[in-house]
Image (cartoon, rainbow, N blue to C red):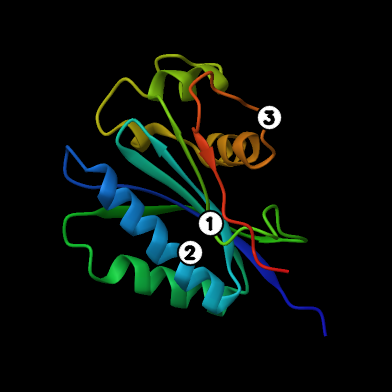
């Protein structure tokens, strides 16, 4: 039996001044939950906000997202994409991670002013979100800052 797969993309943010260790904690929690439920994805940190893609069986994505977002009173999230997919874009990743300046993200989408308002990701369209996820997922974009792209590979 072929399992049905979906992709869900959320935008979100927290209080200003989110600390680096809080991002690391969120990423660790996502990787543990995703591994347990066979969900893959990518987390982009853009100008203080998150763009997060999950791929997997619909029921498993619901479990992972409800777990990750349940106890985050300082964080808001909004689902902007939920659609069926034929195959995973990140089959080996529990949760890839990249950080990007909001101006760079706007340049990649052809609109340098796109993320100049606050909160920056509220103007992001579903197509724009999928484009950024795809660019970083396929490693088509390299920043000149070292260590910007990190991914955890699933064990074989």
- Label 1 element class: loop
- Which quadrant holds residue 115? top left
- Relative to 135, residue 96 above or below: below
Gap between marks 1 and 3, in whole Å? 18 Å
Q: Nearer the viewer, mark 3 or mark 2?
A: 2
Q: Is residue 91 left or right of residue 149?
A: right
Q: Position of residue 57 (x, y in %)?
A: 62, 74
Q: What residue is shown at x 34% (from left), y 37% (from top)?
A: 122
Residue that sits furthest to the right in the current view: 1
Q: What residue is shown at x 55% (from left), y 72% (from top)?
A: 35
Foreground pick, 156 / 140: 156
Tag 2 near tag 1, CB within 8 Å: yes
- Label 2 element class: helix
Q: Is residue 85 left or right of residue 151?
A: right
Tag 3 near tag 2, CB within 8 Å: no
Q: Report the residue marked by disc 3.
A: 140
Mark 1 neighbour density, 10 Å: few (under 14) some (14–19) many (20 or more)? many
Q: What residue is shown at x 24% (from left), y 29% (from top)?
A: 118
Q: Report the residue marked by disc 2.
A: 31
Q: Report the residue marked by disc 1.
A: 95
Q: Is residue 59 left or right of residue 30?
A: right
- Which quadrant holds residue 131? top right
- Label 3 element class: loop
- Relative to 113, residue 13 above or below: below
N-term mark: 2 or 1 = 2
Quadrant where the N terminus sits is: bottom right
- Relative to 117, residue 45 above or below: below
N-term mark: 1 or 3 = 1
Gap between marks 2 and 1, in whole Å? 5 Å
């Amino acid at each position: 039996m072929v399992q049905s797969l979906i992709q869900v993309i959320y935008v979100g943010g927290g209080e200003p001044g989110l600390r680096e260790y809080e991002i690391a904690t969120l990423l660790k929690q996502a990787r543990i939950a995703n591994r347990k439920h066979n969900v893959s994805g990518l987390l982009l940190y853009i100008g203080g906000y998150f763009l997060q893609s999950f791929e997997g069986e619909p029921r498993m994505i619901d479990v992972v997202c409800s777990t990750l977002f349940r106890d985050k009173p300082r964080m808001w999230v909004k689902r902007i994409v939920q659609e069926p997919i034929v195959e995973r874009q990140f089959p080996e990743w529990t949760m890839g991670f990249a950080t990007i300046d909001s101006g760079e993200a706007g340049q990649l989408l052809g609109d340098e002013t796109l993320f100049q308002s606050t909160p920056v990701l509220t103007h992001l369209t579903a197509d724009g979100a999928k484009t950024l996820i795809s660019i970083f997922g396929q490693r088509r974009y390299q920043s000149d800052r070292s260590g910007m792209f990190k991914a955890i590979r699933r064990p074989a």
